Image: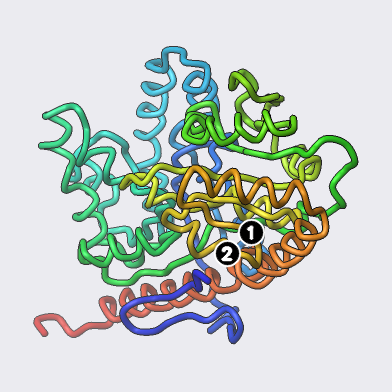
Amino acid sequence: MSEPRLLPSRQVEPTSHQVSDPSVCGRLFCAMRYGALGASSRLRLAQYAPFLNQAGLNVTLRPFLQDDYLTALYAGRQRTGATLAAYHRAIAMRDEIKFHDLLWIEKELLPWLPFWLERGVLRDTPYILDFDDAWALRYAESKSPLARMLLRNKFGKLLRGAELTIVANDTLYHWALSEGARNILLLPTVVDLARYDPVPPPPGPFTVCWIGTPLTATYLDSIAEPLRALSQEQPFKLLVIGAPDFTMPGVDVEGVAWTEDTESALIGRCHAGIMPLPDTAWANGKSGYKLIQYMAMGRPAVASSIGANNRIVIHNETGFLAHTAQDWVTHLRALRADADLAAQLGACARRRVERCYSLGVTAPILLDTITELLCNIAGRKAGKRFATPGR
């Protein structure tokens, strides 16, 4: 499993965790990239806020881009106004930051601006960086020569100045290590199991689930031929959550809009979940969160054998890993033909999420890590105050 772990000093094991000093309080500023519509912001930072507040921390959540930005992005509309408004809000953020003890930054504080500007806003405030995707590729492989020149080294500089870098998978872990990050915590993107109550699959046609956004729905095209072949054998339904306009000729597709309140119930309408990915650097940095959602609902997953998918899915135990187009046909056919097999794999999948990919496992680890950081920061400040001049 992708156990949370911290470098260089220690590894953190979820089965033997104790909060180091629950009495320590602090002011934590969470600089999220998106609002509630952004899955990465909602799951990597915001869903931990109630737990951290309850433990005594004073947590402030501030999205850089509001939901109107993502709404326009998914609809293919112009986003200049939403972006300019975000940078206008960032001006006030500089003054707000100085009243906090620690920043928790999702990816970067000021997108598309060079390191020296971001460093000027951060000033001396200690910060954590959080990554759930290979975000540095956005700059390093940009089509703009100017962006590549000004920004390709931005994340390396930010990483080397961070108190801690939190990453969602092994690919990002090794990237952060290669860039000189001082401390790294591998913390998978997880579900709150209170929102996922497994129910038996409904009667009716075999239904396969995919969940994502209109932008990522294009990954489904990579397995269009296997899905069409299955449909020719025996019709089935492909339920696409989050891309209501998606179609695939030759396959019965039902596209529905995503909402946080309905996502688990929609997955519960299905018999299996899928996650196809191409073998690219960007895809290898993805976190596999949709697999965890399927598994939390007690559904077997079929996934491309790419990146984090290889850790999340245990082949033949919680689902199947597909290497070829024929693998997709073979594995989905097996699940369609054998309801008992699907139920057995789904039950194992749910137990795996309970052990490794649930908020109840990762939240105490995160609290312990942040508490330790705040203790270290407070100690450094105290040392500066009482240091003998000239020494």
- Is 287 displayed left or right of 140 in the figure? right
**For this view, does 75 lie left or right of residue 360?**
left
Query: Looking at the image, is 169 positioned above or below residue 203?
Result: below
183 relative to 99, above or below: below
Pinpoint residue 300: horizontal percent, then vertical percent. 69, 55
Residue toward you, 381 or 191: 191
Viewer-proximal residue among 133 and 211: 211
Q: Which residue lies under the disc numbered 1?
A: 319
Image: 139 above or below 144: below
Residue located 43% across and 61% down the image: 169
Label 2 to label 1: alpha-carbon separation: 6 Å
Q: Is residue 117 left or right of residue 279?
A: left
Q: Amino acid at mark 2?
A: His
Residue 196 image point, x, y percent: 77, 53
Seen as rendered, the residue at the extreme right is: 203
Residue 108 visible in the displayed image: no
Q: Which residue appears at 22% of the width and 62% of the height?
A: 160
Label 2 sits on residue: 315
- Above or below, comparing residue 360 to residue 128 in the picture: below
Which image quarter holds the C terminus?
A: bottom left
Label ID, residue 38: none
Callout 2: SS: loop
Give residue 5's position: percent from left, percent from top: 44, 75
Q: What is the crowding at mark 1: few (fewer than 14 residues within 10 Å), some, or many (at least 20)?
A: many
Of residues 305 and 332, the one drawn nearer to the viewer in this rendering: 332
Q: Quadrant of residue 357?
A: bottom right
Q: Residue at x 72, y 51 (%)?
A: 335
| Residues marked 2 and 1 touching at CB (< 8 Å) | yes
Other residues around mark 2 within 10 Å, as few (<14) / some (14–19) / many (≥20): some
Left or right: 365, with 141 as reference point: right
- The local secondary structure at tag 1 comes to strand
